[in-house]
Amino acid sequence: MALASATRLLSRPLSTISTMHPMAASGFTTSNEFYNRSRPSYQHGPLSYIRNAVKTHGKLNVVELGSGTGLFTRALLAHEEWKASIETLKAIEPSPGMRQVFRENNSDERVSVADGTFQDTGVPDGWADVVVIAQAFHWCPDYNLACEEFGRALKPGGVLALIWNVEDRDGAKWVAQLRDCVERFEEGSPQYRHGYWRQTFDTPGYKKYFEPPVENNSRYTLDVNSEIAIDRACSKSFIVVLNDAQKVQVRADLAAILDKGEEKVWVDEKAGVFKYPYPRNGSSQLFHKPPPPPQDSMAPKPASTAGKAPASTGGKAPAKSDGAKAGKKTATKKSSGATGADGEKKKRKKARKETYSSYIYKVLKQVHPDTGISNKAMAILNSFVNDIFERIATEASKLAQYSKKSTISSREIQTSVRLILPGELAKHAISEGTKSVTKYSSVTNTK
């Protein structure tokens, strides 16, 4: 008994150290106060969205993983829809320095912070109504083990929510330049924008415990000055680990970008305050753990109807009978000359390839059979579709190059679709569109 307890106490710190990404371990060790001061808080709307997704009546047990210095925790406790409904909040954070700053900035008796990881939370089985991960899940080293742990800790019907604050590269030229300046130092560290964390949805653990993901996006701006914008950029883990000379140079480069200020929108130019755009794809992902099925639905179905079509009709036309075959042969002999021309037409028709235009037209006619479409409208629609395809191909090529792969696989295509298309549309596109995806050569210079 004593030996088992000693082993548990010893194994947890070792597990934490070994499962933290090296960049996170080094970048979030000595800069905790700076991180806490520089990073933005979380917006009201996304927090309301997550709260409405949690259907539990009464007080809530909340688990926050990768809680850092407690930025999200404090936003949650200050939110009118959350603060009165929380019974207990267990924050889990592997960095001792982050935990120390968390404790210094929290006085709520309902809240505790402890050592742990995505794969080893220490939370009792079926305890949590909601598991929240803010600005952290892209660091997860094993998505399948993490999902197994989330599923174990959540109550039936509980919710897993992931949320990120992401600077809007497309919101202004200076933001794109700012990000380019710092992102060259990433050195392969995982980031939200890479989308690798979306591999979670394909793991056995996710499929075992959770429903398909639901994505909610919001666009907003924050009022900042140059010092805040530079500090925020320099709070990235891969900038924190640079030597002093490199940090000085990075800050100078960032200051030059902000002084130039391409497409900067001023709030108060005299005071030096301007808008910092955050995009719609700084998102919340909600994954519901399904409640247990009703008792009567637990009964096994007869083998012949257990979710499958009978063998003779499983997606194929019924087999022809021998009599029908014989009749067909006789008819063929009698009318081979008369039907030769028709056969040639059928072959030619079969060989005809379906174009984007014909496919789109066919889909439109299926949805609205009595509605026509003009040539101009079809041209616009084609242009739109081609643009989407080009954007997906470009993003997929970047992902393949980032992973140093010579081919684009279906995984890069799926990730690109999720990054570019809205949630429900992306889900449909992936279920329908990636069934026939094979590997394509990765083009280095994609337009």
Image: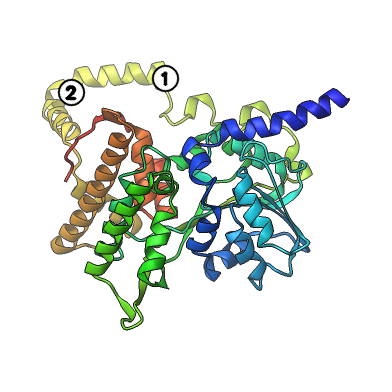
336 or 111, which is in the foreground?
A: 111
* Residue at image location 43% in from the left, 51% down from the top: 236
447 or 212, which is in the foreground?
A: 447
Residue 156 relative to residue 355: left or right: right
* Residue at image location 36% in from the left, 73% down from the top: 275
In the rendered image, the vertical position of residue 313 relative to residue 211, given as above or below: above
* Residue at image location 28% in from the left, 46% down from the top: 392
Percent x, y for residue 122? 73, 40
Q: Secondary structure at mark 2?
A: helix
Percent x, y for residue 376? 14, 63
Q: Which residue is mark 1?
A: 321
Cα–Cα gap, marks 1 and 2: 21 Å
Q: Is residue 60 visible?
A: yes
In the rendered image, the vertical position of residue 235 relative to residue 259, given as above or below: above
> Which quarter of the rendering shows the N terminus?
top right
Instruction: Give residue 333's quadrant in the image.
Output: top left
Residue 13 relative to residue 408: left or right: right
Q: Type of residue at label 2?
A: Ser
Q: Secondary structure at mark 1?
A: loop
Instruction: Give residue 267's quadrant in the image.
Output: bottom left
Q: Residues within 10 Å of mark 2 (few under 14, many from 20)?
A: few
Q: Which mark is residue 335?
A: 2
Judged by depth in the image, the label closer to the viewer, 1 or 2, is: 1
Q: Type of residue at label 1?
A: Ser
